Image (cartoon, grey):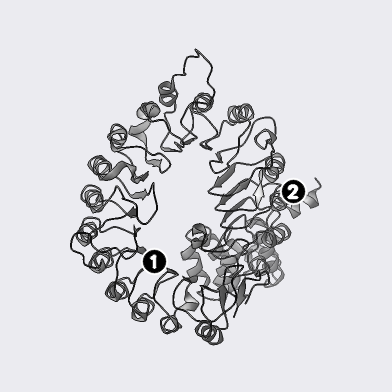
Amino acid sequence: MSEDDERQRSPPSDLDFVSNKARNCNATGSGSGHPEFQSAYPDQVLENVLENVLHFLTSKRDRNAASLVCKSWYRVEALTRSELLIGNCYAVSPARVTARFARVRALHLKGKPRFADFNLMPPDWGAHFNPWALAMAKAYPWLEKVHLKRMSVTDDDLVALAELFLGFKELSLVCCDGFGTGGLAIFVNKCRQLKVLDLMESEVTDDDTDWISCFPEGESHLESLIFDCVECHINFEALERLVARSPSLKKLRLNRYVSIEQLYHLMIRAPQLTHLGTGSFSPPEIAGQGDQEPDYVNAFVACKSLVCLSGFREIIPDYLPAIYPVCANLTSLNFSYANITAEQLKPIISKCHKLQVFWVLDSICDEGLQAVAATCKELRELRVFPVDAREDSDGPVSDVGLRAISEGCWKLQSILYFCQRMTNAAVIAMSKNCPDLVVFRLCIMGRHRADHVTGEPMDDGFGAIVMNCKKLTRLAVSGLLTDKAFDYIGRHGKLLRTLSVAFAGDSDMGLKYVLEGCPKLQKLEIRDSPFGDAALCSGLHLYYNMRFLWMSSCSLTRHGCQEIARGMPHLVVEVIRSSDEEMDDAVEILYMYRSLEGPRTDAPKFVTIL
C-alpha cells in the first residue's frame, strides 16, 4: 500500500490537528521572526485545551451536553468523538453524521422499535444498514467497530464491511436479519484483524456454507466469538482449530448443535475463557459404543477465569454437577434456556455467592427463587422468563418468589419478572426493600389480572415503585390498572426514560398523566390500551424531546394522528397496517419519532407517513 493510500485510510491524527494550528499561529505572529514568542488566537488556544479535555469525556450524555455549550464546544466535541451511538437510524441521515463527525472509529446503530421482537411489526418495514455502510466507507475508511441492533443487514453489507474497512475489528449484530452463512463466510475470510464477532438473537439464513472454516489460517486475533443464535450445524473440526489458534479468546458462546462432548474439547483448548456459552449441554445424538465419557468436571476446573456462564440448550440435568467447580467465581449465570427444577438449581445456586446477574426460566418455581434470595446477596439483575407464555397457563412463580427476592437481594437494581399471579403487597415490599431499583418490569401475562388475594387493581403496587425507587428510569406495567396508577407515575416518575404499557388504563386521562408529568420520557411503548386522540394530543410539548412513541391496538384515528403531523413538522408520524389490511380511519399501529431529515424514502406500501 502506498503512503498516500495509508494516509487516506487513517483518521486525521491529533498531531496533524495540532500542527495545522501551529502553522496558522506562526503565520499570524508578531513579526519577530521567533516562533516561540508568537501567540495563537485566544479561540485556538481554547480549542487546543478543550480538545485535550474532551478526550477524557467518555459518557455520551456528558458529550452531548458539552456540544450544546457554544459553537466552539460543538465543533471541538465533534472533532474528538471517536464513537457514535445513534438510537434511531431514521432520526438522522448518514450524510449529516459524516459531515459533522470527522474521526469516528466505532458506530452503534439501532433500527426497528423493540415491539418488533414480538411480531407486532410487519416484516420488511425497513431499517436497512446499506446506506450507512456506503457512507461510512467514504468518510471513515479507518472504521474499526460496528454494533447494530434490529437492523436489516444483507450479505452484500457484510462483504462491504470486510472489503472497504481494511482495519475492521469488531462486528456485533443483535436482533438483526437479512443475512446468511454465505455472507458470514466472506466476511470472516477477509477481515484478517477481526477481534469480535457477536451474533445475538439474530436470524441467520442457512446457505449450506461452512463459514467457520473460512477464518484465515494462522494465529487469530479473536477475543470474542458468539454464534448461539445460528440455527444450523457447524464444522466442529474447523471450530476446534480456530479456538486452538486464538490465544486471546475470552468469550465463546456456542449454538445448540455443539454437544457437551465437543464443548469439553474446546474448553481444553481454551482454559483462558472468561465467558462461556455451553451449546446444548447434552451428549451427541450418536455416541460411540463403549466410549468413556470425558472428565467434564476437570475441564471446568481448568477454566479458572470463568465468570460468565450461559447456554444450556437441550440440557440433560445429569451433567449439571460438572459446573460446580466454577460457581464460586461466577458473576453472571444465564439459565434462560434451561428447563430445570428448583431441586436441580439449589446445589448450583448455593455456591454462587458472587452472582450479580441471573437469568432463569420460571420452571424453578417460587422455591427456586427463595434459594436465590438465600445465597445471592450481591445480585444486581434478575430476569425470570416463562416456559409457557400463554395467558391461561398456570405460572409456577408468583408474588411469593418476588417477595423472597426483595427480602434477600437488597442490592437489586434491575428486574424483569413474568408471572400469572401477583399482589400489591409483594410489589410494595420490593419498593421498600430494593430502593436502588433502576429498572422494574413486571409482566403479569393474563390480561387485566388483579391482585390475586384482594381482587383490587395493581395501582398501589406500581405507585409504590415510582414513589420509593428514586432512581427508576425504566418501568413496564401490566395487570389490572386504572388511571390511578398512571397518576402515580406522572406525579412521581420524574426520572423515567422508558415506559412500557400493556392492557392497562381506563381512559385518556391515564396517558395524559404520564405525558404531562414525566419530563424526561424518551421511549413510550403502549399496546392494547384504551388511549385515543385526546390523550395523544396532550403530549405535543414532549414529543420533540422523545426518541419515539409506539401505540398499537389502541383507540387512535387517522384524523387524530394527522393533527399531530400538521402541528409538529419535524416529527415523523408513521401509520402502519398489516400488508393485506385496507386503509380506514382506525389506526392499528402508530410509530412516531423525531427526525432531522423528515420522512424517510424507503417506506414500504403498508406504511403511510402523514
- Mark 2 neighbour class, 10 Å CA radius: few under 14, some 14 to 19, many 20 or more: some
Q: Secondary structure at mark 1?
A: strand
Can you tell which mark lies on residue 214?
Answer: none
- Decide if residue 534 is in sight here: yes
- Mark 1 neighbour class, 10 Å CA radius: few under 14, some 14 to 19, many 20 or more: many
Q: Are marks 2 and 1 in contact (CB under 8 Å)?
A: no
Is 96 positioned to the left or the right of 573 in the image?
A: right
Q: How far across and how far down the image is residue 249, in percent? A: 54, 35
- Picture quarter containing residue 139? bottom right
Vertical comparison of 159 with 208: above or below: below
Q: How far across and how far down the image is residue 164, in percent? A: 74, 51
Closer to the eye: label 2 or 1: 1
Residue that carries the numbered disc 1 in the rendered image: 502
- Picture quarter containing residue 237? top right
Quadrant containing the N terminus is top right
Vertical comparison of 245 with 203: above or below: above
Q: How far across and how far down the image is residue 345, in percent? A: 31, 36
**Count of numbered tags:** 2
Vertical comparison of 375 with 503: above or below: above
Is 553 positioned to the left or the right of 386 in the image?
A: right
Can you tell which mark lies on residue 163?
Answer: 2
Q: Amino acid at mark 2?
A: Glu
- Decide if residue 376 is in sight here: no
Quadrant containing the C terminus is bottom right
Q: Residue at x 31, y 33 (%)?
A: 344
Q: Amino acid at mark 1?
A: Ala
Is 154 positioned to the left or the right of 317 in the image?
A: right
